[in-house]
Amino acid sequence: MIKLHKNNRARVVEKLHKKEGVLFFKGGVTPNCYDTDKELVFRQESNFQYLFGVEEPDCFGAIDLSNCASYLFVPRLPADYAVWLGTIHPPAHFQKKYNIDHVLYTDEAESTLKTLQQTIYTIKSVPELPAWLSGFTVDNDKAKEALDDCRLIKSEEEIKLMRYVNKISSYAHCEVMKACKPNMKEFELEAMFLHLIYVNGRCRHTAYTCICGSGKNGATLHYPNNDKDIKQGHMLLLDMGAEYHCYCSDITCSFPADGKFTHDQKEVYQIVLDAQQAVMAVMKPGVAWEDMHRLAEKTILEGLLKYNFIQGPMEELRKNHISALFFPHGLGHMLGLDTHDVGGYPTGVQRIQEPGIRYLRARRDLQKGMIITVEPGLYFIDALLLPAFENPNLNKYLNVDKIKRFMDFGGVRLEDDVVVTDTGIENLTICPREIVDVEALMEKKSHPKFTFNFGL
């Protein structure tokens, strides 16, 4: 891990193309629950994590661009804090722990930077930068561009970490699938996932709040409650991912509550699986991500036609954005130190203002080393379909009677995390996707394709 952050600092310095000046960053602060003295579990700010890997809050960090020398500034804590926090470590402890060239206290940061007498390159951040920085010549733009470019393309060390966190998350998803049965509560599945990633993977954090939707709740894209009963015949949509040293996974599995797909569930599920597989088969460096979204839309339309959910010529269906009534979100997003990671939109590139694709979180050509999610979905959402039933420009393309039969179905999403390689992709996610594999895992409670060891 120490080598990882040292290499990251060197990458950013090289990308910045500046031979003098100082990169300066503020780390995350001790989080409190609103206006109380209750401290929340600390999670480091992502850019600070990328460059320094420091686990403690309330720090500053700097890099001298002339020689890539690193500086860490830690809080000067009173000795009696040891009663509450344990040992109060001196700067030398952090210097050794994180392989930092110079470690001082935060109250020495301003004077130290003045001795370097250079432009300060930083980024506007939350929490806000210290007020004393206004006394320096500050550039808020170039550092962000360099950081985003470096974080976009993962190093081998980062890919290794993300393989690990995907393995842990995949294992937990498989175990949850095996344990699921009707009459459970949605939050039981969430609780099981949280337990498994912590105990087996040392993952104290999730990358985002778990989404555990059963039945109609699966049609709410960011379903927040996880508090309803799981009933016989329900389709489950579970979007959950662990985080390890701030590196994220983002996986969605969809499966029947009782382990066997009904005819209706097979139709919807297969449409989504076909879209995911079509995209993964052609992903490689140089491919435009917006074209992959269009491919997913086209494949979903073909499936909806095949199973008689919609009708009409493909050209008209695409022109009228019928796919967005069922697949209203983007195909996927960059993944790394944040779930929706940086770099999706290069400078000057704008979103396409059309239904569905306007929510695509990345619009650029794929490059080797990018990690991106592939997450097509198909949902029966009241807010989209009920108005469409009444719209003569849209309802002529809809088999309304059949769709109405699915209005309590919910939805299906399949989401895998993939890294772009020289010639294609490596799928970091290890979850059953074929219908036969999902049913076999849930029926037999084991599957030779989905066994795990947890070595990093």
Image (cartoon, rainbow, N blue to C red):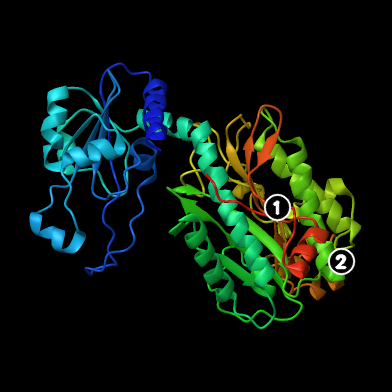
| Residue 196 x, y percent position in the rendering | 53, 63
Say which of 291 and 335 sits in front: 335
Q: Mark yes or no: residue 185 visible.
A: yes
Instruction: Determine which of the numbered discs, if any, sits on residue 399 in the image.
Output: 2
**How far separated are the C-alphas under marks 1 and 2?**
22 Å
* Type of amino acid under label 2: Asn
Q: Which residue corresponds to the image point at 54% horizontal and 38% vertical from the top-left?
A: 159
| Residue 413 x, y percent position in the rendering | 69, 58
| Left or right: 129 in relation to 235 | left
Q: Which residue corresponds to the image point at 69% horizontal and 65% vertical from the top-left?
A: 384
Q: Which residue is mark 1?
A: 376
* Type of amino acid under label 1: Pro
Determine whether 289 is above or below 444 in the image: above
User: Alpha-carbon neighbours of circle 2 within 10 Å: few (<14), some, or many (≥20)?
Assistant: some
Which element carries disc 2, helix, strand or loop?
loop
Determine whether 230 is above or below 430 in the image: below
Q: Mark yes or no: residue 334 visible.
A: no
